[in-house]
Image (tube, helix red, strand yellow):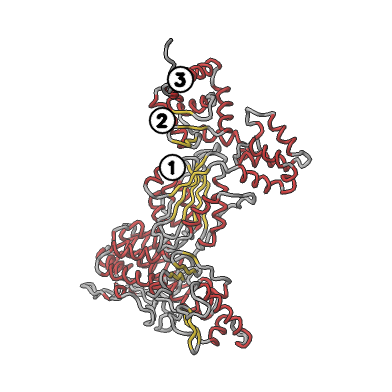
Amino acid sequence: MSGTTSGLWCGLLGPLLIRRAGALLDLGPRTRRVLALRLLLEDGRAVSTDRLCEDLWPGRPTSLTAPSLHTHISRLRTVLERGRTRHGKAGLLVRESHGYALRVPPEARDTVHFEQSLARAERCLAGGRAGEARAQAEYALSLWRGAALEDARDHPFAAQQVTRLETARTVAEELHVRTLLHDGDIQQAVSGAEVLTARHPLREAAWGLLMCALYLAGRHADALSRFEELRKHLAEELGSRPSPGTIALKEAGLRHDVTFIRHMAQSAVTSGYDRPAPSVTLPSDAAGPTATDNTSDTAHAPAPFTVAATTPGTDQREPPLTGAPSPRPAELPAGSPFFVGRRSELALLERLSGHPPYEHPSPAAVLIDGMPGVGKTTLALHFAHRAAARFPDGQLFSNLRGFDAAGPATDPAQVLERFLTALGVPPSAVPATLGTRTALLRTVLAGRRVLFVLDNARDEEQVRPLLPATPGCMTVVTSRNQLEGLVTTGDTQSTTLDVPPLAEGLEALTRRLGTDRVAAEPQAAEGLVRFCARLPLALAVAAARATLHPEFSLRELAADLRTTEGTLDAFSGTGDSADLRTVFSWSYRSLSQQAARLFRLLALHPGPDITAAAAASLAGLPRAETQAALTELTRTRMLGEPAPGRYVLHDLLRVYAGELAREQETEEDRAAARHRVHDHYLHTAPHRLGPDPNPQQPR
């Protein structure tokens, strides 16, 4: 590969993207992306200026559009060949005597990788290597990020290729179902075939696969019912009948001929899909016979069901029907207009969301954890809205209610049911059990790029069934808990939110109150942020009060808030989600009895941080039991551990713990706790100080 094309990747299976060495190139406006697509479709052959002008600006005179074309060519070349000198020879976007050519090698295009993997999958399946075939089919589908040639779908020059590629995608989905049947994963095959028939109600191959899967699952009545659905669809929409192969499959089901049914499942014809033109050179190992080239002792069987349908009154076959486009849910709640900062966390999220499937072979998942009120959901939604365009197949959101006084945490099976229907699965096709719903979600997502935001998760068991397995998808999870299980197994990367620095707190306050009001009283504004201990939720409550009372100066507001010092009364907003005491209580109620008691007593500790030994003395508990309670408090982010073995309460959590201690601990118990920790420091002080380096000699 030449230096010009080294590290190049062109993605046509969705919105056009071009990367060099992993970096996404900014191609500019849509017209320039369409120009790049037009040239890419020629596989290195030159396209005349007249042809390009007509394809990009149909019906307009070339004399008027040619200057614009040359400008777009020049700017596209600058992006693609950034290292080339102004008068240096072009190596990628070249001018030839009769036009322009974009010389991108086949291995740098996702369309070639897709068709290569599809051919391999067919060949592996024909050779009885179902596991390899399944892996190849899943990789092929993972390359899809949206509709084929999405930027140019409304241009006539792209129509034929769009139809061919979308048909190939459907063939790949059907092949994937066949690999599942061959591999013995019958339930997932049923789910996948149900999705296919819902998307393509006139595609006979999909119905045949569904009938095979249902027969092999022992659901004979359901298989016959699906045959009747197909017959009705074909009669009403096309005035035709099922093909002889599909009728033979129905008859085989009636006589319980499992051998014939298995043959039909494993050798279904995928007609209507043209292989790439000879000018596209696939790698040598992509060539070879397809599954339909294979012969066996069942060759005498009737022709299997086919993709196309017969036109009434003729013997010709119509082009394959690709069906309606899949639904593209857009469920994200509105983001906050006051979001500021969080640059390092956003950088992690952006980096993971920008990987194409071929660079990142597993789906991206990020856990955002942190104490209550620190802004986890705000960050997740801000990122999700920024990244939505990178996930053209949809964005799904669910509040898992892991910490909610209104009721128990949301059942993941219910979340899966809603996700599946949002992605186009008919409610009647949603399986009953959690495991089968998870399997169906992963089948539905094959070849699609969808962003999931799972907010307010309680534990790993609630989240794990909801994680997609498809490269190109991404999941953002927020939780007050650490969810170590997800991180330990490598399923998820994590980032822990701390309170923002003072400067970001001031910036957030300025966003809410306006530059003039904050600039007029900078010291009072800073004091307000400090009083809120830089906690975003507390600052939002205080800022809301300032907004509702524009007649108050910030100095007066800060002075009024200080009268409530030692309590959370200043942060009692309207509604539970804006009341800091209520928000903290949702986490507190999840603690074990021992951890909750230790949390209350920590408010009595006089210093800024505490060790496990001091905490054991404070609580009057054995060291092991105390350590277990400390671990629970840090795992639920009710307690920080800035350095190994040293624990810190956030200022406002300390206030909350103090309120609870006064309510639930007697005066005698509080005094006893203070006395124990005081004794601890008296007895351990000499060990902490060490020997006197200059001891006085006795006289």
Label 2 packing within 10 angstroms: few (<14), some (14-19), many (20+): few
**Nearer to the camera, 56 or 319:** 56
Q: Which sits earlier in the primary sequence, circle 1 or circle 2?
A: 1
Regarding mark 2 in the picture, which secondary structure is present there? Answer: helix
Label 1 packing within 10 angstroms: few (<14), some (14-19), many (20+): many
Label 3 packing within 10 angstroms: few (<14), some (14-19), many (20+): some
Asked if residue 243 lies left or right of residue 536, the reply is: left
Residue located beneath label 3 in the image = 680
Which quadrant is home to the C terminus? Answer: top left
Q: Residue at x 48, y 26 (%)?
A: 598
Which amino acid type is shown beneath numbered disc 3?
His
What is the CA distance from the residue labelled 1 to the residue labelled 3? Answer: 34 Å
Residue located beneath label 2 in the image = 628
Which quadrant is home to the N terminus? Answer: bottom left
Which amino acid type is shown beneath numbered disc 1?
Leu
Front disc: 3 or 2: 3
Residue 202, given in percent of the width and then of the height, sits at 44, 71
Which label sits on residue 483? 1
Residue 624, given in percent of the width and then of the height, sits at 38, 27
**Nearer to the camera, 19 or 588:** 19
The image shows residue 20, relative to residue 433, as above or below, that is: below
Front disc: 1 or 3: 3
Which amino acid type is shown beneath numbered disc 2?
Ala
